[in-house]
Amino acid sequence: MSETPTYRKIIHIDMDAFYASVEQMDNPALRGKPVAVGGSENRGVVSAASYEARKFGVRSAISGVLAKKYCPEIIFVRPRFDRYKEISAKIHKIFHDYTDLVEPLSLDEAYLDVTQNKKGNPSASLLAQEIRLRILNEVGLTASAGISVNKFVAKIASDFNKPNGQKTVNPDEVLPFLEELPIRKFYGVGKVTTEKMYQLGIFTGADLKTKSIEFLEKHFGKSGSYYHKVVRGIHNSEVKASRITKSVAAEHTFDVNLSSEIFMLEQLDRIAVSLERRLKKHNISGKTVTLKIKYSDFTQQTRSKTLPYFISDKSLILETVEELLYQERMKDSVRLLGISLSNLNTEEKKAVVVQLKFGF
């Protein structure tokens, strides 16, 4: 007798326009209006956009100038990360009422493994529905969800019925779902890769599935093996309750471009203070200091140095950053500076996942 296949039950929860939705919740005057968190009509980059703004093509990562051009009525709001963290903590508390296998990807999204859950409910779809309803009733925000047998498919599915919806891809639906999927919607396939795939005649999952692993590795290197597996529904990455912090960073975009290293050093001192505060709060130190520089033409440069010992003090961080700053001349005026510390003293903790088969 052949063994009955086992499936994990993964939910991907993604808050709807999280930062902008928090601002609209806290300020009724913003409700129903196009809102951009971050940026301004003169400079800066949009961190998040409300659905009213998205109708005009305003998206995260575009410049405030472009956002204003797309939507003249756009309202720019300064980000309040402490408030977003506060709301995120409430949402994650709800997650943990259902399972301890919660892997946060950011403040506004997370994976939940509910194969075995605290409610004893065998239906991941009903659990996702209940979680979304609790977030709405207890926090006041809407969330969307994707439910499937692995993280890859669940994340793609969560985007299908946004906002305030969910989609379940059952085990027997995974392969047809992936075959019909436009290649641009595959998680991990960005703009550049999409264009390259188009040139190779790959427009859907079905097209991707016809390509051999040798062909994909030839054209996409190590990623070729990943594409070959995921289009066949193979993605065995577990939901990790403890994600490894690989780096800690702080940065700042300036209202006026800086052209003097002396002024830059003054700003880097402030950024180093912020970074030290974050490091001390989580008892983290690291060996590799990286200086991030974004010039006025939006080109970016990083300069790094690895020390033989762990550091977390502002004075030692700034000493290394100053060395990196004067390592070579600036090619233009600077609009953003950042400092990050990596090669940290953190260790990975592995989560144990039990696989069982239940109806979705």
Image (cartoon, grey):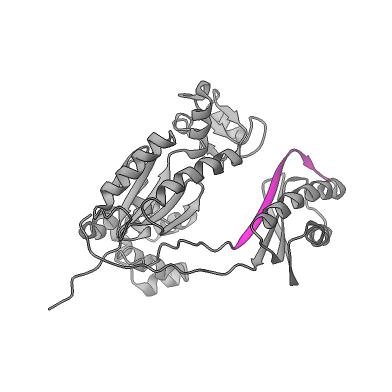
Give the residue drawn at x 65%, y 66%: 344
The front one of 286 and 65 is 286
List x then y, in percent, for residue 65.
62, 33
Give the residue drawn at x 48%, y 30%: 53
Q: Is residue 252 magenta?
A: yes
The front one of 248 and 323 is 248
List x then y, in percent, for residue 306.
73, 69
**Residue 346 visible in image:** yes
Residue 214, located in which quarter of the rendered image?
bottom left
Give the residue drawn at x 41%, y 52%: 96
**Residue 142 visible in image:** no
Going by the picture, which residue comes out furthest to the bottom? Answer: 1
Give the residue drawn at x 30%, y 59%: 9
Number of residue marks: 0
Is 282 placed above or below 352 here? Answer: above
Is 48 placed above or below 117 here? Answer: above
List x then y, in percent, for residue 241.
46, 61
Q: Is residue 294 magenta?
A: no
Q: Main secondary structure of the magenta part?
A: strand
Q: Is residue 219 left or right of residue 7?
A: right
Residue 358, located in which quarter of the rendered image?
bottom left
Quarter occupied by the N terminus: bottom left
List x then y, in percent, for residue 203.
34, 55
Q: Is residue 104 left or right of residue 337?
A: left
Magenta region: which residues? 246-259
The front one of 97 and 295 is 97
Quarter occupied by the C terminus: bottom left
Going by the picture, which residue comes out furthest to the top? Answer: 29
Q: Is residue 120 left or right of residue 286?
A: left
